[in-house]
Image (spheres, helix red, strand yellow):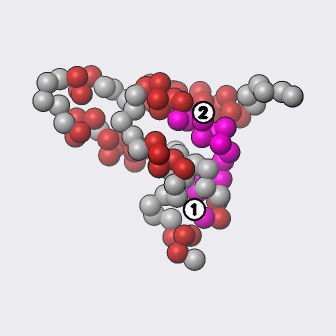
Amino acid sequence: MNFALSEDHELLRDSARSFLDKEINLAPLLVPGATVKDARYDANWSKMVELGWAGLVIPEDFGGSGMTLIDLIMVVNEIGRTLAPSPACCLASPPANSSSLLR
């Protein structure tokens, strides 16, 4: 059995790594008195949604990205590596603007 990552998985991991390395800066949170606003939480999450990370493993028929659990692991691993202030648990939930769920 082959447990190596596919090229698609490596590409997803590398693009998540590149995005997070560019966008996540924890320095503002290390200042005494820093607040959640200093984390740019909303701006970062909006960009993650644009990348299709919200609802990553939810089927496309229900408003998600329809990816696999391995894809989810690639993204969540990079979020953890960068300590990105984001609702990573929402990656397995449908996007908030998903009208498909109302059908």
Q: Is residue 68 magenta?
A: yes
Q: Please identify the quarter of the rendering in which residue 21 is found.
A: top left
Q: Which residue is mark 2?
A: 74
- Name the disc covering residue 63, or none: 1
Residue at the limit of the structure toward the left, as seen here: 33
Q: CA distance from mark 1 to mark 2?
A: 20 Å
Q: Nearer the viewer, residue 82 or 43?
A: 82
- Residue at image position (65%, 65%) is 61
Which image quadrant for residue 47? top left
Q: Secondary structure at mark 1?
A: loop
* Location of residue 78 in the rendering, given as x and y in whole percent from the top left corner: 51, 29
Q: Secondary structure at mark 2?
A: helix
Residue 19 visible at all: no
In the image, what residue occupies the spot 52% across and 75% down?
Answer: 102
Please provide percent x and percent y for residue 98.
50, 65
Compared to 99, does 17 lie above or below?
above
34 or 50, which is in the foreground? Answer: 34
Residue 20 is left or right of residue 16, and the answer is left
Q: Main secondary structure of the magenta part?
A: helix
Q: Which residues are magenta?
A: 62-76
Against 52, residue 18 (above or below) is above
Q: In the image, what residue type sits under mark 2? A: Met
> On the rendered structure, is 64 left or right of 45?
right
> Looking at the picture, which amino acid does disc 1 mark?
Gly
Quadrant location of the N terminus in the rendered image = top right
Q: Residue 88, percent across and down?
A: 46, 42
Which quarter of the figure has residue 32? top left
Q: Is residue 97 magenta?
A: no
